[in-house]
Structure formats: C-alpha cells, structure tokens
Amino acid sequence: MTLPSNLKRDPTLPEPATSTAAAPASLPRRHFLHKGAAMAGSAFAAGTMGAGLARGESLAIPEAGKAMGRPIPAKEYGMPSKFEKDYVRVRTNVFVNRQNHSDWSFTPLQYQQGIVTPNGVIYERHHNGTPDIDPDTHKLVIHGMVKQPLVFTMSDLMRYPSVSKFYFMECSGNGLTDWTKPASTTVQQTHGLLSCGQWVGVPFSTLLDEAGLAPGAKWLLVEGADGAGHTRSIPLNKAMSDGLLVYALNGEMLRPENGYPLRAFFPGWEGNVNVKWLRRIKVGDQPWHFRSETARYTDPMPDGKWRQFSMEMDAKSVITNPSGGQKLAGAGFYEIRGFAWSGRGKVAKVDVSVDGGKNWREAALEEPVLDKCLTTFRVPWNWDGRLAVLQSRVMDSTGYVQPTIQEIGVARGIHPYAFVQHHNGIQSWAVTERGEVSNVIAS
Ligand SMILES: Nc1nc2c(c(=O)[nH]1)N[C@H]1C(S)=C(S)[C@@H](COP(=O)(O)O)O[C@H]1N2
Ligand SMILES: [Mo]
C-alpha cells in the first residue's frame, strides 16, 4: 500500500502505537489497512482514508472550560443543541399545497445517526391536521363480528401485556414527485416520508381473542378520531400475526402528531394503514373499500387497471451521505452511508455503485439487522475528484432485488403526470468535479 507523500514516515523509526494520520486514532489501523488492501485498485480503494483529517497539535483552553456551565433546572424536557437548527422536519417544497391540514412534512434523513428517528423529527402525514386528545376521556371500541363487544379506556389498555419492537414506517407516497424528473433536491424530500423506532403497544391478537372472533370473520375496520375520520380495511390475518395497538414510541408516549394517545401499527405495511388517534375496530367478513382503498393508495398497472390493497412495502434503499444539496470538501476519503429496509423481511445485502450502476460493491451492514426495520449500510470511498453517480441497491431476505426507476416505472405503467404511490426505484446522486451533490435520474 502506498501512502500519500505527506504521510511518508522514516522507515528506520518504530511503528507508532496509534497512527498519526492514516486512520482516525480511535479506530484500529490494521483493520483499515487490511480492508484498504482488499479493495485496492477499485474506485472504492480506501488505502488513503483519513489522510489530512487528523494531525497532532496542542489545543488552547476553550472558553467553555473557563466559565460556569448552565445549571440543571428543577425539571425540564431536554432539547437539542441550538447549533443543530437544521435537524428539523420540513414541509414539501415540490408538491406545493396552499393549506396545511392535508399535508406532509419530511424526516431529515441526511442528519439521522443510527436507525432510530428521534420523535421530534418523525415525518408527519395527516389528512386533516392533528387533534389534541385527552387520554383520560379517549376510548377504543371493538365490535362487529365478535362474541362480546368491548370498550377500553387508555388506562385499561395499558394494563394488558405489551411488546416493544423496532420497525420502520414509510408512507407509500414517498418518492411520488420524482418518477419522471428529479424534482426533489435533498434526501429529506426524496425519501423523508420514512421513520424508524421502537414501537410499544398491545398486540391486536390479545384484544381480539378477548372479544372472541365470530365464525367467518376475515377483515377489520380501523377508524381514527380525527376530523378526516381516516379509516382502512385490514385483513384479520395481518392484525392477528403482528398488528399492534401502539401507545408509545422511542421511550415516551406517542407525540400528538403521531397518533396520541393510541394508533394502529401494522409492521412493514404502507404508512396509511397505521391509523392514528384510533377509536374504533370493527370485525367483518370483507373489506369496506374506503376512499384510501379506491380513489387513493392504488397502483396503476400497464393494462390500464388499478391495483388495490398493495400494502406490503417493497424493499428499498437510499444513500443519505453524500446526498442531494451537500457539497464534498474535495477529493479524498468519504464513507458512503445510507439506509435499507423491506416490508417483507430483513435486509440481506446492499450493493453500492459510484459509476451510475456499471460496477457494484457490497456494502457492510451494521448490526442490528432486524425484520422490517431500517438497516444502516456503509462503504468506504476514495473520491478521485471526477464526476461520480452514487447508487445503492438492496436485496431482501426473500431474494427480491430493488429495481431501477425505469424497471419499476414500466411495471407500474407510469405516465408523466401521475402522482403514483409505492416508488421503490434506485436513487441516483450525481457528484460534480466541484463536489456538488444533486438528485439525478440515471438512464
Ligand atoms: N387518523 C389518521 N391516521 C392516519 C393518517 C390520517 O390522516 N389520519 N394518515 C396516514 C398516513 S397517509 C401515514 S403515511 C401515516 C403517517 O404517520 P405519522 O404522521 O406518524 O408519520 O399515518 C396514517 N394514519
Ligand atoms: Mo401515507
């Protein structure tokens, strides 16, 4: 392995215990060199990683070290540093809406560290704003084809045995503006109708067993208490296998915008079925064909018909760093990072290309790799300063491989003005010689 000239050491000196520059000092250098050597000769070669990023020098005592710090208040809900003001969800700047009751905001995925989306930046999607519901008066009813109808208060519900599970949630409208042109500028806009966290709630099966299912029961109606009266039909099998009545997310009660005090959650299925502010479950023998199952949330097929009830989210991945709107500081080492997920199982493999899909290299998947959950992938990349097109492609545990945008567009019979759901095509980010990263559609 050849080091850049500014890193050449005197060969007569003993090897230093920790590297001065070839790798960040906190990381085992030999591991880096081994990996770098394995990749030498490819666009990903990482032999010079870290060059120029770390040098020894003594630091002056900082101002913060000379002053009294902020004392601990008697009580508070802590907030992020005031310097993190870009880590916020934002409404769309593509699909402009004149009012914001039926609207959406996006998760800033380019800043998300690890698989958990902090509650304050989880994307929002609702059809008639956020209601403010008092948990002391909120009730849930289960009725229809059951042996005994049941009504629950929130405190009743929270006494039942609960589970805590990590899952992603994605709105099927994610990517809807970018089928035929790269309209969105950032990964927040292209993929930010996506979140992941630890959901806490009572299994649907527990309460349905208590109500007692009548013979012939096959479907559930789940209805929200919001002004939109949002309602969906859910196959009973799904609810019984892993459906949850969720009251908490990431260590605290649900936020109002995410359904406080109670929402339905069906792992791996399109966000729309996860009815927020849940007030009613009716058991029936067939689906009800609500607005969100006919006029919306359907997929066009090449034969001109529209497919209903495609609720499982297909496997998808995206590079979050580098991503649209960012600027690279010059040629040299970068770690390409991103997320992959599948509504049908685990992430099995992620490949990354830096030449628009001609050559691929397998990314490292970071533990934990969980069922129906965001998975972090990473690839070391030595940018040579020339035009690059970055892409990622996931394969899930069923063997399904993420399609190109052209492939999925043909499968869906896309036409230029269609606002079509369930876009899981491969995302491309172009990096120019000046290091500017932008959204492109690679052919
Ligand atoms: N009651 C109710 N539930 C709802 C909606 C709604 O408008 N009303 N929107 C749905 C849609 S389209 C999505 S993608 C998810 C968004 O959940 P979030 O706002 O917690 O991210 O909630 C779903 N549940
Ligand atoms: Mo959605």
Image (cartoon, rainbow, N blue to C red):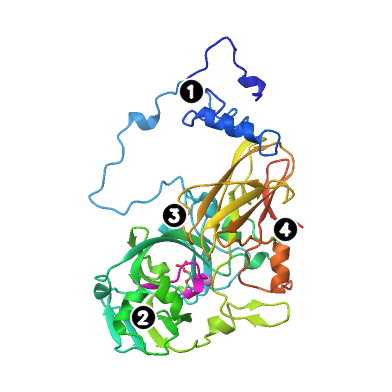
Give residue 151's position: percent from left, percent from top: 28, 83
Give residue 182's position: percent from left, percent from top: 69, 60
Q: Which residue is mark 4?
A: 441
Circle 4 packing at 10 Å, graded few (<14), some (14-19), many (20+), is many
Q: Which residue is mark 3?
A: 116
Mark positioned earlier in the residue sequence (4 or 1): 1
Give residue 205's position: percent from left, percent from top: 35, 76
The image quarter containing residue 135 is bottom left
- Name the amino acid type tagged 3: Val
Name the side, left or right, on which 443 lies relative to 144.
right
**Quadrant assignment for the N terminus:** top right
Highlighted magenta segment, given as a residue range: 260-273
Mark positioned earlier in the residue sequence (4 or 3): 3
- Name the amino acid type tagged 4: Ile
Mark positioned earlier in the residue sequence (4 or 2): 2
**Above or below 330: residue 273:** below
| Residue 189 shows in this picture | no
Circle 2 packing at 10 Å, graded few (<14), some (14-19), many (20+), is many
Q: Which residue is mark 1?
A: 18
